[in-house]
Amino acid sequence: MSTEATKRDLVDAGGHQIAFTRAGRGPAVALIHGIPTNRYLWRSVVPPLVAAGLEVITLDLLGYGASDKPADADLGIKAQSGVIVEVLRALNWPGGTVVGHDIGGGVAQLIAIDHPEVVTRFVLVDSIVYDSFPEPGIARLKDPVWDRILGAPDFDLKKGLTKGFKRGMVHADRITPEMIDAYERPFHGVEGRLAYLRAARALRTEELSSRTDAVEKIELPTLIIWGAEDAFQPLKFGEHLAQTMPNGRFEVIEQAGHFLPEDAPEALARLIAAFATSVSEHSR
């Protein structure tokens, strides 16, 4: 499956071009990444989902990956949720399972609240929940000093990304130069790094924390999956949310960290596929 945008896998949403990839046939699943990743995150998850009889759409959020990186657009999770819904409708999305990792999980929660007509069930993977974001490493980028630091011609973003993935993954052998290149490439050069700053600075805690009551009352079947050794998002937050929701279920993948699609893609795909193809009383 291609991870590079081409003319045929770009769709307009509010005047911005959003990159996506579509594969397989069957019940629909949309995969939404977080920060600092892009749809490349799902490359090892998509094939087993397709093999399980699912149609899978992966998307680059606005400001990420091969999607447009406008200097003046709102890149917060609320605005992103509206963009994703617009994209899905443009793709004639029939409704299905929405899966979100990290801030993509926050986007998925807001879609489930504000656009329940497009979601039949959803999955949160090591997601932001309540007021758990932005985590300190991202939050510090709001300091104006980072304009100068990341704007320096010799700044090496790959080193920072490598450090983050080493902290966020258990299986360090999976952190290859090819992987780091794929995540750094969309933010390459001074303009790219400033685009990364805009994405990080757009994250506003209150956009999710102010909707806590509504999230906890979502009645859609919900699967919350966590890496047992997540260093960025507290496992107890995901467990609490699952216990609070009417139809929430919590699963832990051992020997895995925050970046589950990189750390344990096979186990993650099995859980998503079983959930997306199951029949519940709610969905009948």
Image (cartoon, helix red, strand yellow):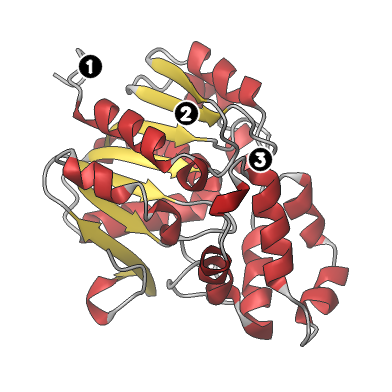
Give the image quarter of residue 163: bottom right
Query: Taking 195 as reference, is 84 left or right?
Result: left
Above or below, 232 against 280 in this view is below
In this orientation, does residue 141 appear?
A: yes
The location of residue 31, given as percent across then percent down, is 36, 48
Q: Dot 2: what SS?
A: strand
**Residue indicated by mark 2:** 225
Image point (46%, 75%), residue name: 68
The image's mark for residue 282 is: 1
Q: Which residue is mark 3?
A: 206
Quarter that holds the C terminus: top left
Report whether residue 201 is seen.
Answer: no
- Farthest-out residue, bottom: 153
Figure quadrant of residue 230: top right
Q: Amino acid at mark 3?
A: Glu
Instruction: Judge left or right: residue 22 versus residue 193.
Output: left
Residue 54 locus on image (x, y percent): 18, 42
Q: Residue at the right extreme?
A: 145
Query: Circles 1 and 2: CB distance less than 8 Å?
Result: no
| Depth order, front residue of 151/184 | 184
For marks 1 and 2, give the one nearer the viewer. Answer: 2
The residues bearing labels 1 and 2 have C-alpha atoms spaced at a distance of 20 Å
Residue type at mark 2: give it.
Answer: Ile
Callout 2 crowding tier (Cα within 10 Å): few <14, some 14–19, many ≥20 = many
- The residue depicted at 21 percent of the width and 16 percent of the height is 280
Q: Are marks 2 and 3 in contact (CB under 8 Å)?
A: no
